[in-house]
Image: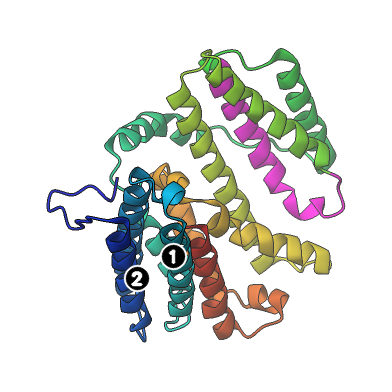
Amino acid sequence: MSSCNKDDKYQFTTSRSAVETYRAFLCKIKSVRTSNTKEYVASLKEWKEVNDTVYKFLVADSAFVKYHNEANDYFLIRDSIRKEMLRLTETWRYGYDDVLSIKEQTSAYKDDGDLAEAVSLATPFFASLDSTAISVCDKASILKRYRYFLTTTLSKGINNREDMLRFIRDEDYMFRTFLHHLYEMDDEPLADISRNTEAICRNIFIAAREGRIPSKDAIVYMSMRTVRRLLQNSAECVENINRLEMKGKAQGNAYLWMIIQPFVSIDPFLLATMTPQERSRFEYIVTQLPKSRRFADTFDINLSALNYLLPQQLLKIYVLSI
């Protein structure tokens, strides 16, 4: 509800005045020649505030139905502002830590007390998962057990909260054991594992929709599970790519995507569900990438260039999602 404030900062009398206020912000952004993390955060926050306020006024005023000129102007101005924000990403050498900081500070869920409380209640469950050591087995064994676990879970179904928590706990154990053999999986067909995992997750949300699992629990626990998996996967890839020779271009490309996936896939809501443990894991990834010579070599690009060009692209992806 970024557009709601006690000072009533934006006071529109007509749809045209709302559009002109939006245009004034565009002119302001156009005049900015350089930026840094603090200033970029401030600009993004202001953009979100004025955009939400103008949009809600136009909708309430039926401008999108009655006055097509105002509606057209709004969308043109919004696109122009987005282009200017993309331009500003190139005026400063943002790092991986800057990308994470900007996404966190501009998240609409940053100060969501209800979400923070729900995450706090779920944190002990996730903190307990690492107390179970991974299985000592070979690649063939873990794949066989992983597949059996998923097909059995699909057969039994997810019918209540306890089933959901049992799935998350058992899957985490399987996934961590699987990651221990990740380097060996370069030529292994894994589509069935992905497909069955997606089916189980879909069933969990169906159960929540039908009232068999509290909706808040399904959203919070599954979001925290997603963050944990993405960061576990990325951290393991960082370890492997710095310690082992890639077997080929295909494996190298797969590793690169898995390493940067948290920066792309962990959206503002998922960021708000991050536990201190996962935050620490994310910071580990952030600190390792800038000094990873092999990471740059796999990209076939200069390390110093990679350390600002890739964060720049990641920041652009975030801006395009707004």
- Furthest toward the left, the residue is 7
Residue 279 lies, with reference to residue 160, above or below; the image says below
Q: Which residues are magenta?
A: 163-189
Looking at the picture, tell me which residue is in the foreground, 260 or 92: 92
Q: Is residue 93 left or right of residue 244?
A: left
Give the amino acid type for the residue marked by disc 1 in the picture. Asp
Looking at the picture, tell me which residue is in the foreground, 78 or 99: 78
Q: Which mark is residue 23?
A: 2
Q: Is residue 296 left or right of residue 214?
A: right
Residue 51 is situated, as x and y percent measured from the top left of the image, at 36, 58
Secondary structure at numbered mark 1: helix
Residue 86 is situated, as x and y percent measured from the top left of the image, at 48, 74
Please name the residue shown 74% across and 27% down the image: 150
Residue 154 lies, with reference to residue 122, above or below; the image says above
Q: Is residue 120 magenta?
A: no
Q: Which mark is residue 187?
A: none
Looking at the picture, tell me which residue is in the foreground, 253 or 21: 21
Give the amino acid type for the residue marked by disc 2 in the picture. Arg
Please name the residue shown 33% across and 84% down the image: 31
Q: Is residue 175 magenta?
A: yes
Kindly report which numbered mark, 2 or 1, lies closer to the viewer in this rendering: 1
Secondary structure at numbered mark 2: helix
Secondary structure mostly taken by the magenta-highlighted segment of the chain: helix
Q: Which residue is mark 1?
A: 73
Looking at the picture, tell me which residue is in the foreground, 91 or 86: 86
**Residue 45 visible:** yes
Please name the residue shown 32% across and 38% down the image: 116
Q: Are marks 2 and 1 in contact (CB under 8 Å)?
A: yes
Residue 7 lies, with reference to residue 221, above or below; the image says below
